[in-house]
Amino acid sequence: MSDLARLSRAFRDRIWNAFPVAQPAFGRLLSLLEIEASRATETASVTLGARSRLRLNPDFVALRCTDDNALVMLVLHELHHVVLGHTRLWDRSTPALNFAFDAVINAQLCLLFPGAEWTRIFRENYDSKQLPWALLRPPEHWSTGIPDWLPGEMGLLHRRLYSDASASYEELFPLLAEAFESMGEGVSLTGVGGLLGSHGDDEDASGEGDVDPDLLAEIRDIIAEWPRVDRRSGRDQGGTAHTFNLDPSCRWEAASRIIRKALVHMGDTCEPGGGRPRRVERPASRLFPHRIREDRRALVLEAMGGEPLLYQGEGPRKTFSRSGKVHIYLDVSGSMDRLIAPLYAALARFSSWLAPELHVFSTVVQDITLEDLRKGRGQTTDGTDIKAVTAHLLEHGVRRALVITDGWVGGIPSEHTHQLERRKGRFGVLLSHGGDSSFTKGLPKVRLWNLPNIDEVKG
């Protein structure tokens, strides 16, 4: 067995023996990676492909990770970088953004594990007095006394990173990137004393080629549990619920046609309602020139010596019936931002076919009136969670529901799926262009429709 193979086995044993049980999501992600010792990376990296690997430089580990806690922090740092770097929150990577990524990741890890044995790797790798590197580590005496914060604006930024007043990624990234650009010219980002982990520079670390779908699923689920980064993020925990008012006057004819088709399918003539009118055949009393069933009036007339001209019977007659009204669940999360107003306008045209309350959902479900729909009012947390929808369906006994979403809503709990199957309801999903339909597997007997690309056919 080669030296690198022996080191790879030793790294696996050390990491798994020391990996914190408080991080089960990252534990699942780590289990999908092959851990290997490699000098092809400066510190650590993850290659994403058909064979996904976590690479650790044995020389750097020997220098900075002499104890298991430091090694685990290096691994957690790299797993955070994988999750952030491959979700395409920013269109392109720059040295300033790479620095900002590391600053936020290091601070988050230190807040999770504030003990000196855990933060040691950052304190030893970066000088607390040298800018910009001091932003990549906690200040002296942090968590043990009065912190020695950096002076001036750098100090304010340092406090936001390492205190309860920490801002969102969206606020911190531009500030950190600006701080690095103002003083990081000519500074090397690699090697000992540089950035930890890979930032798209290592061979195979860019994620080109086929990526393990299980790995991507774990990454997506981890992101979903994080606080909201920005309104483009799709599925996440969101922020504080807030109301919105939009202009529902814009028209999207292509969406209106598909919504109408879905409502025609979703309506139920077996339930009383006032929804869309449907032409049906129902039995009705009619007169026939011959006997088709027992007619007491004809029998009496015949007993008196007469002969009936026509006989009473029952036959089909075409008429109109109002179907049961459909419950609409409209995704109003941040990733649906551009579609909400035109969908409000399209749904308002079919208000007589809809249940009296329309349900808008993010991480919570809010019931709004048809008047709110016409005026463009609603509430959102900007995140998304389909569990809120299925819980609402079960709690209120909804049997006819059309969910309009981009599909980035997470998974439906199995217990909700089992209960919905017993309801014998009818469920439909109207999916935005490019959306993810995988969550529909948790809905019984679901019918799927696709919205067109709003940029191509809106009008």
Image (cartoon, grey):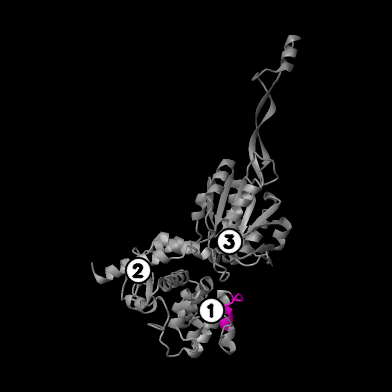
Image quarter where the N terminus lies is bottom left
* Distance from the alpha carbon under mark 3 to that under mark 2: 38 Å
Q: Closest to the observer: 51 or 449?
A: 51
- Give the percent coordinates (x, y) of residue 76: 44, 70
Q: What mark, if any, has residue 173 been given in the picture?
A: 1
Q: What mark, if any, has residue 11 been given in the picture?
A: 2
Instruction: Determine if the magenta segment contains residue 158.
Output: yes
Mark toward the start of the polypeptide (3 vs 1): 1
**What residue lies at 55% left-to-right and 43% top-to-bottom?**
421
Q: Which residues are magenta?
A: 157-167
Q: Residue furthest front?
A: 144
Image quarter where the C terminus lies is bottom right
Camera sees residue 209: no
Q: Are marks 3 and 2 in contact (CB under 8 Å)?
A: no
Instruction: Determine if the magenta segment contains residue 25.
Output: no
Mark toward the start of the polypeptide (3 vs 2): 2
State the SS at label 2.
helix
